[in-house]
Image (cartoon, grey):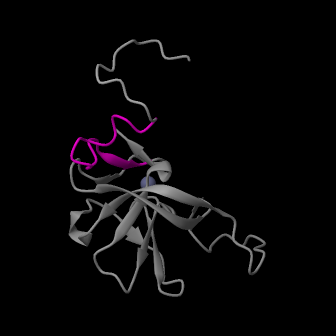
Amino acid sequence: MDSGEADCPTGGSAGRAGLVAQDGKNSKTVLCQRCGSKVLCPGVALFTEKELFLPAMRKKLGSAGGAQVEGEVDGDTLTAHWLVDDMYAFENVGFTKDVGNVKYLICADCEIGPIGWHCVEDKKSFYVALERVKHA
Ligand code: ZN
């Protein structure tokens, strides 16, 4: 209860109201949380709920000699995603190396991630987690 402005004529119920347009598409530009690099233009991704596990965010996967605990991956199961069916719909995006049959999406500029999830067996499903990106 700390919103200073009393606007929002359509009165959203969920916190993501305003992000999802009436047709279920993203109404705002999707940006990298860290560097602001543009990931998706408005209207190219469909809001989807699906349980996907994404490892914890970090920059530059697998570098800077940290002590990694093997077999134990820190992360979150996220359910709110932008679904994109065409890789060319992305403005900027990078991919990690395959982990099994999964590739994770990362920021093309600063390489923070994972911000999303993609199965190499399904060329038409790219998921970008709402919680891992910024909307503007
Ligand atoms: Zn970035």
Quadrant of ligand 1 in image: bottom left
Question: Which residue appears at 35% of the width and 69% of the height?
Answer: 126
Residue 83 rendering spot, x and y as whole percentages: 33, 62
Q: Quadrant of the N terminus?
A: top right
Query: Over which residues does the magenta segment extend?
Result: 15-32
Q: How many marks?
A: 0
Vertical order, 32 against 89 (above or below): above
Q: Is residue 47 magenta?
A: no
Residue 88 rendering spot, x and y as whole percentages: 21, 69
Q: Is residue 26 magenta?
A: yes
Name which quarter of the figure residue 63 lies in. Answer: bottom right
- The kind of secondary structure the magenta stretch mainly shows is loop
Vertical order, 19 against 9 (above or below): below
Residue 33 rendering spot, x and y as whole percentages: 46, 47
Vertical order, 102 against 19 (above or below): below
Name which quarter of the figure residue 89 lies in. Answer: bottom left
Question: Which residue appears at 65% of the width and 63% of the height?
Answer: 75
Q: Quadrant of the C terminus?
A: top left
For this view, does 9 lie left or right of residue 133?
left
Question: Which residue appears at 75% of the width and 74% of the height?
Answer: 68
Name which quarter of the figure residue 40 lies in. Answer: bottom left
Nearer to me, 38 or 53: 53
Question: Which residue appears at 26% of the width and 69% of the height?
Answer: 85
Residue 115 rendering spot, x and y as whole percentages: 47, 60
For this view, does 58 lie left or right of residue 24?
right
